[in-house]
Amino acid sequence: MTPRLIVRSDDDHAAFEDGADRGRILIFGRDTGGAYGLMEWTVAPAPAGDGPRSYGAHFHDGCEETFMVRSGQLEFLLGEEVVTLGPGDFVRAPPGVRHGYANASGAPVELLVSFHPGGLEELFLKYRTDGAGPAEGDGFMADAERLFGSAFDLD
């Protein structure tokens, strides 16, 4: 069987916005036989005077997530530890490990984010906030809880 080659362009409808953040799916889990999904993700800076930082702590029992910083600086929560990541830094959040992040840098942060197995990336596109959604249903968190064993609001 010949492998299926996939080329994504900026106009292929895989780009989305989630509030002030934005992303683009580079490869869907459905394109890899479920093995992985990969997306570009740009995290907007937190608004000035936002008070105590929330890292959006969560975990996924049903998938692993990885993050690689392409540009900018990000505070990253992994377990109970917070580390500052910069360009070229990489972090792996295994299944069941609490993680999250905050952009307190004042500038956008560009990441590559992968999901193993793939599929969670579909929810970012499904529940986008840029006028091309959101979809009918219970919402991102409910779908992530049901499909990937995710839990949210763990700050």
Image: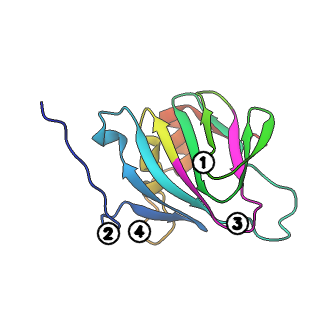
Which x, y percent locates residue 72? 66, 60
Q: Upstream in the sequence, badge 3 or badge 2?
A: 2
Residue at 48% over, 70% down: 130
Which x, y percent locates residue 30? 31, 40
Q: Which of the labelled discs sits on residue 88, or is there none? A: 1
Q: Upstream in the sequence, badge 4 or badge 1?
A: 1
Disc 1 residue crowd, few under 14, some 14–19, many 20+, Cα 10 Å: few
Name the element at disc 1.
loop
Give the distance between the C-alpha atoms of the residues marked 1 and 3, in whole angstroms: 19 Å
Q: Which residues are magenta?
A: 98-112
Q: Is residue 100 magenta?
A: yes
The residue nearer to you, when weighing 38 against 152, is 38
Image depth: mark 4 or mark 2 in front: 2
Image depth: mark 4 or mark 1 in front: 1
Give the distance between the C-alpha atoms of the residues marked 3 and 2, in whole angstroms: 26 Å
List the residue tagged with mark 4. Answer: 132
Q: Which image quadrant for residue 57?
A: top right
Q: Upstream in the sequence, badge 4 or badge 2?
A: 2
Disc 4 residue crowd, few under 14, some 14–19, many 20+, Cα 10 Å: few
List the residue tagged with mark 2. Answer: 11
Under mark 2, the amino acid is: Asp
Disc 3 residue crowd, few under 14, some 14–19, many 20+, Cα 10 Å: some
Name the element at disc 3.
loop
List the residue tagged with mark 3. Answer: 45
Quadrant containing the N terminus is: top left
